[in-house]
Amino acid sequence: MKEPRVLYVLANCSFPPSEGAHEQSLNLIREISGRGVSCSLIAGFKEDAPFDASEFKKFAPLVDVETINCCRGSYTARLYLNCIAYLLKYRLGLPRTWFPKIIWQDFEVLSVAASKEHFYDCVHVEGVPFLPLVSRMLNRPRIVSTVDAWSLRQKRLFSSSSGLVGKIARGMAWALANVVDAIFLRRERHVHVVSPSDSAYLRSCGVSGAFSIPIMLGSGALSSPLDGSDRSGIYIYGDLQVSYIRDGVYQLLTSLSGIPGLSGDEIYVLGRRRPPSDLVAVTEQLNRRVNFISWVDDVDESMRRAKFILLPDLAGTGLKNRTIAALASGAVVIGTIAAFEGVGVVGGVDSIIYKKPAEAWKAVEYLQNRSSERSAIGEAGRLLALANYAPSVVTKSWLDIYRHT
């Protein structure tokens, strides 16, 4: 069977990847290109997170790449602008020259894709902002990847937000997401998300083309795990720039003082940024040191050395890169229900699930000196991750989709 030719169009990407989602997309493209599939990439990027095309060619030498500096604003803001662009061009028929360039920023990426799509068998489009435009600008069979159910994410963020301004902003984003689902997503024959629960949610909203293929483990996560005696440290792992993760870290740290029996292992917060003042203030009141780490060169290696990994997500949707990588490390992974959503873990067997922060610390306290129980939970989590998220497993699922799109 002749392998398909695939054109990837990413709404926002960077290289070296500055976000886990970028890393996931690029790992997939490299893996697919290594299976005999002809691949090209058109990547929009932001000035503060550039895409180094020459370095990417070393990473994925079989992939042709074109980059466009056009991304300004958040996903939500870009989606608003593209809805306006859709109304102006396709409903009112007004010329682009009448309006500011910022309204048409994503036209640049999709226009390049439209000029090349006839060379390919299918187009893989990733990014919520593109949704108002893809059906009008692209004609080849396509897969639209939203990664998670964006309307569900906005609904949960609305529910967890505080303050009048926050509620209004989140409410508007939720309303817009519902409009996008109703008008644009329902048109698409193939809508990809990474979580089965997100796929089921979208189908319940009338998006009949929704399907799920999970994220894949990076090559670094496939290294052999360390023996339990070589592990040390309690790692709280999450991006402090994300409000519902930062709040989860805050809750964990404020509850730490109530666990007097917890001792020995150092506590680290892998947060991708310098800690905000409220987190620093909390740690100053504790009787033990908390080490904030804004960046590590090899996060998988850090995970391999951890004894415990805590995932504090209070909201969110879809599978989390961090969750899969943490499970693959062989450490005991302790997380919230939101952190494990869509993974299919069994609490007490391959992970520990907590509802209250004190429960997380109690689990650490109980398992600290029980090496055989720690090893059993860590190994079960690792086997779960390898069975479902290894590159060979995920790549096969994508190849099947590309061949039948």
Image (cartoon, rainbow, N blue to C red):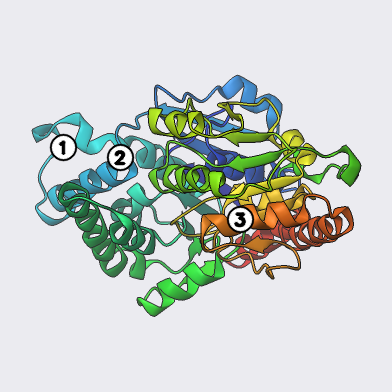
Q: Residue at x 38, y 52 (%)?
A: 138
Pointers 3 and 1 in contact (C-beta within 8 Å):
no
Q: Is residue 66 left or right of residue 224?
A: left
Tell me which amino acid carries mark 2.
Phe
Question: Element under label 2?
Answer: helix
Q: Nearer the viewer, residue 376 or 223?
A: 376
Tell me which amino acid carries mark 3.
Ala
In the rendered image, which quarter contains the C terminus? bottom right
The residue most toward the front is: 260
Q: Select label 3 or label 1 by which is in front.
A: 3
In the rendered image, which quarter contains the N terminus? bottom right
Q: Residue at x 31, y 66 (%)?
A: 181
Q: Earlier in the sequence, mark 3 or mark 1?
A: 1
Question: Element under label 1?
Answer: helix
| Other residues around mark 2 within 10 Å, as few (<14) / some (14–19) / many (≥20) | many
Q: Which residue is mark 2?
A: 107
Q: Which residue is mark 1?
A: 96
Q: Is residue 343 above or below residue 33?
A: below
Q: Earlier in the sequence, mark 1 or mark 2?
A: 1
Q: Residue at x 81, y 60 (%)?
A: 383
Pointers 1 and 2 in contact (C-beta within 8 Å):
yes
User: Could one spot residue 97 in this view of the protein?
Assistant: yes
Q: Nearer the viewer, residue 141 or 168?
A: 168
Q: Select label 3 or label 2 by which is in front.
A: 3
Tell me which amino acid carries mark 1.
Arg
- Label 3 and label 2: CA atoms lie apart by 47 Å
Q: Position of residue 12 (x, y in %)?
A: 43, 38
Numbered badge on residue 360 = 3
Q: Nearer the viewer, residue 234 or 136?
A: 234
